[in-house]
Amino acid sequence: MHPIERLRFVARASGADTNLLARETAGALAGFADDPAGLVMACRRIVARHPLSGPLWWLCSRVLVAPDPVAEAWRSADELDADHTGRRLVDALPESSRLLAVGWSGPLQAALGRRGDLTVLSSGCTTGGRLRSRSDRWWDDDIDDLDADAPTIEVPAEGLGGAAADADVVALEAAAASVAGFIAPAGSFAAAAVAHHEGRQVWMAAGVGRYLPPRVWDRVEHGLDAMGEPWERGFEVVPSALVSHVVGPAGLESPADAVRRTDCPVAPELLRG
């Protein structure tokens, strides 16, 4: 497939897993090895199409500032391949705990198949209350040894506050993050606020490429603001002050330590306009 066509395919994708989308983008960008101007335009178009995706901002920024953009694209793709944040989060959960998962992606849900001792409350997840395992094999090499499905308790929107107050851990997935807050699916702010007020733990899953520097984070927030009224958006900003633990590729860490993982450079040509 021609790089332009592949990039169009990625740009039009909606609802796809963020890491998978970023890896496909890396392959498309590698096709612009002999076209520096085309590479800049391609990166600007992809983040304009997916303005809330931390991994895409991270990938495009790294590619644009690298001496060898092609090598950097594939290096970044390898880092995304090695990201097992979902597995780290699930393995770190206390035994027999009650978990509220708000808006988790398929791979994070798939990782829950590793634990049969959990009570899982699901709100706004993408698989309709069933936790996939075999369908997301790229996420975890051991996934074939797990049950095909793990049932959850579906939580309606009007019951989100009660579920957050009742859960031992509220787990939220960050699409992008900064020192001040993180982008998460709608409903995450309410769940985190209730859990924090009730003394429950709030865990944020922040995998590779999620933490962004202030200048890039400002553009992400601008992209969110452009999506209409706050109650009409599918995503929202959750303050970092509500988070008790962060889970990254290496496992459980404090919010202060997690911020130090910010490794996204600032590419000025990506921020113009």
Image (cartoon, rainbow, N blue to C red):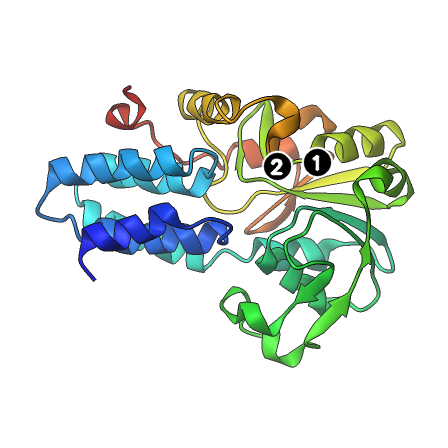
Measure how far apart labels 2 and 1 are at the Cα level: 6 Å
User: Looking at numbered disc 2 in the image, what kind of residue is underneath it?
Assistant: Ala
| Quarter occupied by the C terminus | top left
Q: Are marks 2 and 1 in contact (CB under 8 Å)?
A: yes
Residue pictured at 70% horizontal, 24% vertical:
241
Residue 71 has which mark? Answer: none
Instruction: Give the residue at the far bottom of this rendering.
Output: 145
Q: Nearer the viewer, residue 92 or 156?
A: 156
Figure quadrant of residue 24 = bottom left
User: Looking at numbered disc 1 in the image, what kind of residue is underneath it?
Assistant: Ser
Figure quadrant of residue 199 = top right
Residue pictured at 19% horizontal, 40% vertical:
39
User: Is 248 on the left or on the right of 155, as rendered?
Assistant: left
Residue 184 has which mark? Answer: 2
Residue pictured at 26% horizontal, 41% vertical:
63
Q: Nearer the viewer, residue 93 or 229?
A: 229
Position in image of residue 167 (x %, y %): 87, 45
Instruction: Give the residue at the far left of this rendering.
Output: 34
Residue 188 has which mark? Answer: 1
